Amino acid sequence: MDSTKEFREFILTGDQTFIPHVSVDCVIFGFHEDQLKVLLLKWKTSGQWCLPGGFIKKSEAIDDSAIRTLKERTGLSSIFLKQFHVFGDPDREKKKDDFLSVHGTKKDSWLMQRFITIGYYALVEFSKVNPHPDFLSEECKWWDIHKLPKLIYDHNQIMKAALESLQLSLNEYPVGYNLLPEKFTMPELQTLYETILGVAIDRRNFQKKMLSLGFLERLKERKTGGAHKAPFLYRFDKKKYEKAMKQGLKFGF
Amino acid sequence: MDSTKEFREFILTGDQTFIPHVSVDCVIFGFHEDQLKVLLLKWKTSGQWCLPGGFIKKSEAIDDSAIRTLKERTGLSSIFLKQFHVFGDPDREKKKDDFLSVHGTKKDSWLMQRFITIGYYALVEFSKVNPHPDFLSEECKWWDIHKLPKLIYDHNQIMKAALESLQLSLNEYPVGYNLLPEKFTMPELQTLYETILGVAIDRRNFQKKMLSLGFLERLKERKTGGAHKAPFLYRFDKKKYEKAMKQGLKFGF
DNA sequence: ACAAAAGTGTTAACCGTACACCCATGA
DNA sequence: TCATGGGTGTACGGTTAACACTTTTGT
């Protein structure tokens, strides 16, 4: 279906498919070149940047709605996903009329009404993602978390809340498992933590702690090619991780 | 307005007042006689127990909707409130037809449609609460958290999630400030923590830690009347608490 | 006087932090 | 060979956990 037709159908008959007044927005985190990134969409015509999002089908679980959005924007099926907050101020969609009318949406469309949005964040392996815009957007690309543009509506606020939630999650489960490729080095894992938390961590203490948690498996290979001493490669041992989690894991930096 | 008329109007015209498909459910925690309690409602006719909840007015912030519900059920205006999770499985309201038709709701009512519910938990001072049923319910009373009846729909699951969220919150802020009366003893505070966490804590270490956090003020009075040695009374010092929070507080048991 | 609960203090184990040294690699 | 980054070990200090003793109060 070409995107103009898809969009028209969406405006006119979307309320037959989707639950009105409720949307889902996804903060998709990736990690690349020592930077924490998020995937953003650029709206056609209005040129505004926003979070990838979607709507909930009438018989769909809200998590499945987020999974569907993720799949469409990244091409990935198996994704770590966490619902972190709901945003429901009646005036959260500032200048909605302006933005949507540019796209040809009529005043009485279901889209013009107030939406309560459920915020999810996702952790994905950067290299596996194939950014793919939706029919509302002309571009879909990664942005550095610390160099974000001004986003539409309250999306900057949603971003901020997602990052804070992610920071708390660092102490609950090994975030690196979802953000890094299968094999990674200890310095890479450390940079990930430092980037998310925004603090510096002592190299030696970090390694000690991570290894003490017991779910990292050191491989016999090393990462060659870079300058300087070749670091070991590690990977997560899922069995050990699950065993450790049952006993109550204590992260914390 | 008598409650039959109120109910009829609610069924027929509620969709003009409220956002469809979205509800709010509140887990109201109180602490009484060394037990953690929750306030539950008993539906008229069907006799099922459920969480107090409500709907969101068309121009109302979702938090305000929860605040309104709290006010109506407890009489309290100033309440600690936290949104903790959204429940949106399409089949979360099992046997909804049965429950609502008992109340005279027609199949095509807005109420019969699927609802996504936003879970909030509240911390209230037990003695200040005046339990007050809504027009759908015949009774509103406290239940021991560990002796709950079978609740309607997925409300038992919502309860469980609320308790787990509360347990995590113990390490973020002083929960006792909202659950205890202004003046309280150290053993009372300790029992509160033990009840929420479900673990035993050493009496002496608990006191040491709590006092070290620096926001408790020991009064010159003691709690008399009970058997045995009269314990000191304490109260939260809000200024010291806020100062301590800015420096980053570390709770944890 | 006694049991039960509350106030206070001491000790040892553990963990986080800081830091020093050596090794490997490419420029 | 030198600068840089990576691997390993140790020592100190603070926090937590375990535990003993005294005081108060009602029965």
Image (tube, coloured by chain):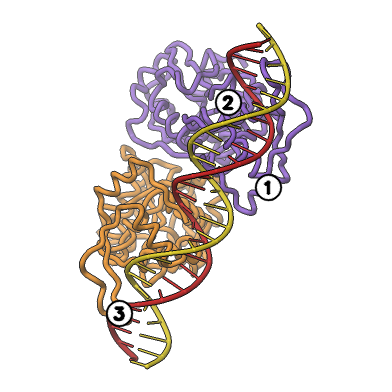
Chain colours: A orange, B purple, C red, D yellow
Is residue A203 left or right of B71 when viewed as pictured? left
The residues tagged by marks 1 and 2 sit, at their Cα atoms, a distance apart of: 23 Å
Q: Return the x and y of residue C20 as percentages of the image width and height.
A: 47, 74
Residue shown at 38% from the left, 67% from the top: A142
Mark 1: few/some/many CA within 10 Å (<14, 14-19, 20+): few
Quick one: SS at disc 2?
strand
Q: Chain of mark 2?
A: B
Quadrant assignment, res B146: top left
For image coordinates 56% across by 55% down, the residue present is: A94
Q: Disc number at residue B92? A: none
Q: CA distance from mark 2 to mark 3?
A: 59 Å
- Helix, strand or loop at mark 1: helix
Q: Give the residue type that dot 2 points to.
A: Gly
Label 3 crowd bin: few (<14), some (14–19), many (20+), radius 10 Å:
few
Name the spot of residue B198 as percent of width and height, x first.
Answer: 47, 29
Per the image, the residue denoted by label 2 is B30
Q: Nearer the viewer, residue A94 or B46?
A: B46
Q: Which mark is residue B242?
A: 1
According to the picture, the residue beneath numbered tag 3 turns out to be: A226
